Amino acid sequence: MNALDELRIGESLAEVTLSPVTRLDLIKYAGASGDYNPIHTIDEEAEKAGLPGIIAHGMWTMGNLAKLFTPYYEEAFIQDYSIRFKGMVFLEDVLTLQAEVTDHTDKTINFNVKAVNQEDKTVIKGKVVLSRYT
């Protein structure tokens, strides 16, 4: 029996709380992703776009959600990942990542996932299908 076998429908994975978002996080992500849109790194450009300040890349937030599944990567992989962006992530936001089991078969486990900020506002939510290695 492995850790995946113990998961039950309705059960939540251990939450992951990220460190506060920093400008350096976003600069590093811009370099890694090639997304140099200045609303993610330059205050004045974000303000010119009508934002109260720089915002995190949506894909930065989405990528971080995968950290929920780190304990299971020896047994399974993310087969499918669908996300809806629900709010913006700003500098110094503290995100908590959450996942709940919605379906469980011998081959796959389905999850509802979301990230909430320090005000308990959902900024991203979606579904993940974790598939066991065969």
Image: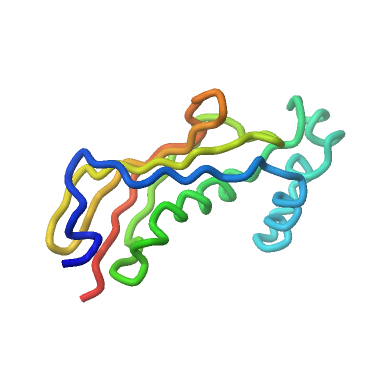
Instruction: Locate residue 62, reporting x and y percent.
Output: 51, 48
Mark count? 0
Q: Residue at x 17, y 59 (%)?
A: 5
* Left or right: residue 58 compared with residue 76: right
Instruction: Locate residue 39, reporting x and y percent.
Output: 75, 40
Instruction: Locate residue 52, reporting x and y percent.
Output: 75, 25
* Left or right: residue 91 compared with residue 85: right
Q: Residue at the far right: name it.
A: 44
Of the pair 27 and 10, the residue shown nearer to us: 10
Q: Residue at x 30, y 42 (%)?
A: 12
Q: Residue at x 35, y 43 (%)?
A: 99
* Left or right: residue 84 compared with residue 25: left
Of the pair 95 and 39, the residue shown nearer to us: 95
* Left or right: residue 109 compared with residue 83: left
Residue 94 placement: quadrant: top right
Instruction: Locate residue 120, reporting x and y percent.
Output: 49, 25
Q: Residue at the far bottom: name it.
A: 134
The quarter of the picture where the C terminus appears is bottom left
Name above or below for residue 16 compared with residue 86. Answer: below
The quarter of the picture where the N terminus appears is bottom left
Q: Residue at the far left: name it.
A: 106
Colour pattern of the rendering: rainbow
Name above or below for residue 17 compared with residue 50. Answer: below
Q: Residue at x 68, y 56 (%)?
A: 29
